[in-house]
Image: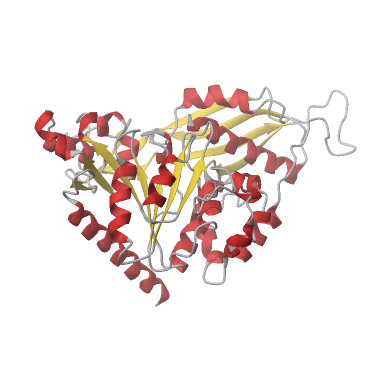
Amino acid sequence: MCTVCGCTKGTPSTKGAKAHDAESHERYDAHVQDDCDRHYAHPHGDQGPQRSNHAGDSHSRHRRSAHQKAHGVQALLSGGAGPAGLKVAGVSRERVIQIERDILGKNNGIAADNRALFVADDLLVFNLLSSPGAGKTTLLVRAVSELKRSRPVGVIEGDQQTSNDAERIRAAGVPAIQINTGNGCHLDAAMIGEAYRRLPLLTGGILFIENVGNLICPAAFDLGEACKIVVLSITEGEDKPLKYPDMFAASSLMVINKIDLAPLLEFDFGKTIEYARRVNPKIDVLVVSARTGEGFGALYAWIDRQAGHQRRAVEDTRR
Amino acid sequence: MHEMAICLGIIQIVEEEVRHRSFSRVRSVCLEMGALSHAAPEAIRFCFALVARRTVAEGAVLNIVELPGVAWCMSCSKSVEIARRGECCPCCGSYQLQETAGEQMRVKELEID
């Protein structure tokens, strides 16, 4: 199925979309020719966020595609091919080289490119994280149904298998791309760059990324988002922030979901918030019910404040 | 199991060095990992041996230098060591801690021939 409009000409994964007839989606005719696998080898190296300045206003989608192609995929080298003339029997050529490189440098370089592109497109991007079943998709369906009235909204969905979540988002009238990670436990920045090029332009709007349901792995990977939002449902217990502190430390906002179930459960909101602030003293907290809509007004107000922060940051850098 | 993805990152770095420096084999890889990084050293060791197969780093010894987590305690206004997130300040018991070091995951050096 097409990953953009839900028609039946492709397959659920972004990888399959390259086989899709592009005639009905003129905007995608460049990327359908791309090799979807090459982004795993996108060799930005260890330059870090400062590397991102080339992804500014002039870094259009098509130019970016050419830029990524230019990097290419290098084949693995096999052992045994030392420099000519240096191999002397009985003489050790062992040596130690200092390289000092950040292991996540490649991902972080691509994330910085994504971030620069999102800012250039005047787009606010949130990365939603939680354990499976916390209610991210239900929360998103309600949020995008209401937010789309005032601005463009899009969603990138990440799951190991199925396009169920993207179909739920599309049914709400919002474009969605499904990324199937197969055996992967998280989304990375290259996947997001690839998926973003398949979405319609969302200038001035909001892009939600729903990460793979997993409270551990996604915390390590910057996708280029403005903020990470962790969703915790009250059926999971109060001590999740202490059990999985990395996720709560990386997030700007904790949304406590399913508060409509509070009369049925013994759930201590104060303790949960205290635990979250032990690992992240600055984390914001909102309580909502994605089923009834309770608390969503405050969530939209929080989103508007983030939009204001991003706008001011962009204005400051242009001065 | 994001440690597998992290180990792929290590191998990519090693292979980029191969292209620049022309060596045939890596005898050992030295990593620096902070206590507050998002990976467990024992999981990295397990995954590295798998990911290094059929590369120049096959059979290489993995040495991991573990570095402490460091945070600024806002209550007692000093820098303190912490072993993991969610711990209190060892001096005053406050949880008002701002991490300042210990998130790094770096390939520090390679022993090659």
Q: How many marks on residues? A: 0
Q: Is residue B92 visible?
A: no
| Residue furthest to the left | A263
Say which quadrant the C terminus of chain A sits in.
bottom left
How far from the left and from the top, in percent, is residue B9? 58, 38
Tell which of A182 and B40 is nearer to you: A182
Q: Is residue A26 visible?
A: yes
Instruction: Give the colouring mode of the picture.
Output: secondary structure
Tell which of A66 and A153 is nearer to you: A153
Residue depicted at x 82% and y 26%: A91
Residue depicted at x 64% and y 44%: A37
Residue B54, by quadrant, is top right
Residue depicted at x 57% and y 67%: A59
For residue B18, side relative to residue A289 (left or right): right
For residue B79, side relative to residue B25 (left or right): left
Residue A129, by quadrant, is top left
Residue A173, by quadrant, is bottom left
How far from the left and from the top, in percent, is residue B71? 30, 41
Residue depicted at x 16% and y 48%: A294
How far from the left and from the top, in percent, is residue A17? 60, 49
How far from the left and from the top, in percent, is residue A221? 45, 43
Tell which of A92 and B36 is nearer to you: B36
